[in-house]
Image (cartoon, grey):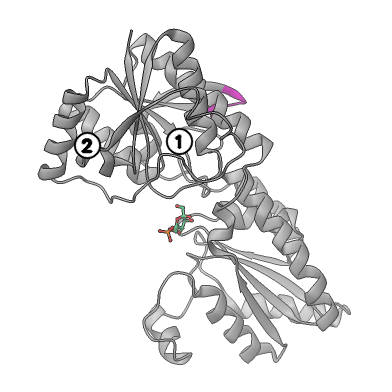
Amino acid sequence: MKKVGILTGGADCPGLNSVIRAVVRKSIDEGFVVTGVKNGWSGLVDNDMRILDYKLTSGILARGGTILGTSRIVPPLEKRRINLITENFKRSGMDALITIGGEDTLKIALQLYREHALPIVGVPKSIDNALSGTDYTFGFDTAVNIATECIDRLHTTAESHHRIIVIEVMGLHTGWIALEAGIAGGAHYILMPEFPIEINKVCASLKARHKRGKSFSIIVVSEGAQIKGYTKEELDRKFNRGTHRVGRIGEVLADLIEEKTSYETRVSVLGHIQRGGIPTAYDRLLGTRLGFKAVELVKEGKFGKMVSLQNNKISYVDIEEAVKQRKMIDADLIEIAKVFYT
Ligand code: F6P
């Protein structure tokens, strides 16, 4: 019989509970015992854990967030916390630790596996879909569906009022959500962190649309997008916003568009709505498949690996592979999006 630990780290996302449920059910099937670590790596630092049984993990499949709680820790971990984590792990008697997380959480997992031989299996999660080594991360599909519904809703009001509406979606480093929700929601321009925004080009496209008789437009922008030719500080001064912080690019962009086109412009920041609530069927299924596979890897003693989706089959890669660089947005999708900019 094995004792398997499980934790969820970093930003929460819909589908986490489906992984926890699958890990517990598959483990019970194998005769293993599962210990849930509370609040990500902090739970191992503070020795905050409890046994997860059938009853505690029943009825959680459709619930967003994580029943284990989570916390954000930026890697690398310093010595004090490493020592506490490794000591508490040993004392708990766990034979393996299933770590569900994104870039930061899995970088810490890799550090603990490499430097302290902690028997870790990673499970990729992120609404951003920015992890390499897997075709998709669960949470992303739900976020895209939420953002698409919001775009649909904003479309009708933009049209009625003959306005430009700038919709800011999440994505600090990658434009996956903007790109997929933007195409699905029929955005007229999609702006992502990967390409600095050429404001004059965007405005020219809006003017061309107006000339064609379309008196409204929808622009989707990732929170991490930058405007070419302006530093963050310049934009903050220009629009008197004080210290720049993430979550403001939509407002800055809307102000610039209004200034350059005189079209009435509004902004809607979707924010954490994209991360909350019930997961889509796709994310529940993906989470369940990944959780099941993670227990299989524990059984086979394959550590330092991350379970992953590859060509719709569940497989695994080295954790290192997943965290060494972010997954680039799909070049084919960018070409498709561009057709609708004119
Ligand atoms: O990584 C997921 C994510 O939702 C990003 O898209 C976003 O930039 C960030 O987390 C927001 O983090 P927080 O919940 O700490 O505000």
Classed neighbour count for the residue bearing mark 1: other residues with Cα under 10 Å, few (<14), some (14–19), many (≥20): many
**Is residue 111 among what the camera can see?**
yes
Is 285 part of what is drawn in magenta?
no
Q: Nearer the viewer, residue 10 or 190?
A: 10
Q: How many marks?
A: 2
Apparent side of residue 3 relative to residue 168 in the rendered image (left or right): left
Residue 124: which disc?
1
| Numbered disc 1: secondary structure | strand
Image x and y of residue 195, in percent? 52, 63
Q: Amino acid at mark 1?
A: Pro
Residue 167 image position (x, y, % from top left): 64, 69
The earlier-in-sequence mark between 2 and 1 is 2
Label 2 C-beta lies within 8 Å of the nearest ligand 1 atom: no
Query: What residue is disc 2 on?
Result: 47
Q: Foreground residue, 113 or 82? A: 82
Return the mark for residue 190: none
Residue 287 coordinates in the image, percent (x, y): 55, 31
Q: Select label 2 or label 1 by which is in front.
A: 2
Residue 127 at x, y = what percent? 53, 48
- Answer above or below: position of 245 versus 8: below
**Left or right: where 162 falls relative to 151:** right
Residue positioned 67% across, 70% down in the render: 219
The answer to whether mark 2 and mark 1 are in CB contact below 8 A is no
Determine the residue positioned at 58% across, 59% down: 273
- Label 2 SS: loop
Q: Quadrant of the C terminus?
A: bottom right
Residue at 34% from the left image edge and 46% from the top image edge? 104
Residue located 44% across and 23% down the image? 53
- Ligand 1 resides in the quarter of the picture at bottom left
Closest to the observer, 188 or 240: 240
Magenta stretch, residue numbers = 309-313
From the viewer's perspective, tell me whether residue 90 is left or right of residue 135: left
